[in-house]
Image (cartoon, helix red, strand yellow):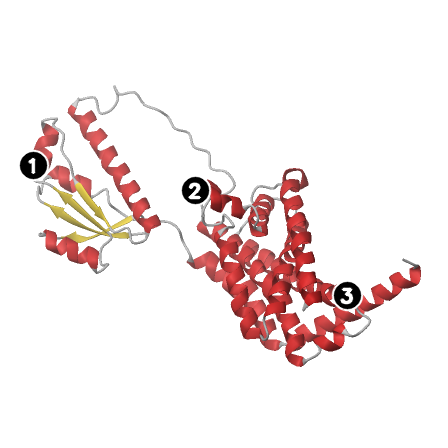
Amino acid sequence: MTWSDLSLAWLRLRVMLVKEMRQLLRDRVLLAFIVYAFSVDIFLAASGVSLQLNRAATVVQDFDQSAASRELISRFVPPYFRIDGQIAHDSQAQARLDDGRSMLVLSIPPGFQADLQRGLPTSVQLQVDTTNSVLGFLAASYANLMVSRFGLEQAASLNGGGGGTLPVIDNQIRVWFNPNQLDSWFMGITELLNIVTVFAILLPAAAMVREKERGTVEQLLVSPLSPFQIVFPKVLAMTVVIVLGSALALFAVLHLGFAIPIRGNPLLFLLLTALYVFTTAGLGLAAATVARNLAQVGMLSILILAPMIFLSGAWTPPEAMPAWLRALMYLSPMHYYIDASFGVLLKGQGLTELWRSLASMLLIGVTVFVWGLRRVRMG
């Protein structure tokens, strides 16, 4: 390739890039959607979504009415539980669980205190609504912990030692990377990565389909431009927009609004984002070769996005997945992007720790982009 060929290729790239940016800036609705997604949507996700058990509605059947039963009931307090009163019959408990007014029903049998004072085993019943399996598991676990601790205290009191003669294990827990275990940190970063994924697929696809709708794609294909020179400026323009939106969300929303730390190099995170956008843009280009209008490309993007998000590992750890799903997860570029992003932002990792994720994303990206480019050429 001669110098004049390189100059001509650079000129074509610059002209096409300016064309794509002008087309995007003229679409006011799309611009407003991008700004909303990288600001308000991420703010709402970080401030309003919680994965913790919070004031679970609890009712009590206290058939003992003793000091011991009242002491046990008093353990079910905020922030995890909320006592909504007492009920007398099992039918009331079933009705409250059925219509969702209560999440837990605690039943204490008659003779509860007497059995404890005589050192006899006794039991309480806890019915838990596990329609939401995560919250149900948390409620059952926290309740089991409190009842077990209450039983140990009663046993220690009965032995007269107040627990002083029993062996004690000092469990020293160190919480790393999110010491206060704030949901806003995890939800805010996760939503940012989801938004980047949505636009990385949707924007290049929409740009290609828009050419179809206007009838200009045929003019481009018969021009001296190669398919790469047509497609690459679209991906590059959308990458610039997505990286700018990510910077806005990271610094103005997450860092200033929720004090989310940036322990690693923020420039490395933005470079990761650019690489990830390039990695997934091929999927959008392939969808654009099938779709005939923006509505179709929107539906196809949802079909691509749903399994990518489910298999990303953001909501379910890989160890909890079946083996065949875990194998599919390693084919998803979003899995590597999430690992690398949390590594940079919360763990302060650098290239030494992230080179495997970068290499995997680059390999998948080149494969998918070449596939998408071939689909465009064939289309």
Kind of element beneath mark 3:
helix
| On screen, residue 67 above or below 314 | above
Kind of element beneath mark 2:
helix
| On screen, residue 143 above or below 2 | above
Q: CA–CA distance between discs 1 and 2?
A: 42 Å
Q: Residue at x 22, y 34 (%)?
A: 150
Q: Residues within 10 Å of mark 3 (few under 14, many from 20)?
A: some
Left or right placement of residue 271 versus residue 2 in this view: left
| Residue 203 visible (yes or no) | yes
On the image, the x and y values in percent for residue 91 come to 11, 55
Q: CA–CA distance between discs 3 and 1?
A: 82 Å
Q: Which residue is mark 2?
A: 320
On the image, the x and y values in percent for residue 219 come to 75, 77
Whichever of callouts 3 and 1 sits on the residue coming sooner in the sequence is 1
On the image, the x and y values in percent for residue 293 come to 58, 75
| Dot 3 and dot 2 residues touching (CB under 8 Å) | no
Q: Amino acid at mark 1?
A: Gly
Q: Which residue is mark 1?
A: 111
Q: Amino acid at mark 3?
A: Gln
On the image, the x and y values in percent for residue 373 come to 69, 62
Q: Quadrant of residue 276?
A: bottom right
Q: CA–CA distance between discs 3 and 2?
A: 43 Å
Q: Which residue is mark 3?
A: 229
Q: Quadrant of residue 371?
A: bottom right
**Quadrant in the picture for the N terminus:** bottom right
Camera-near label (1 vs 2) is: 2
Whichever of callouts 1 and 2 sits on the residue coming sooner in the sequence is 1
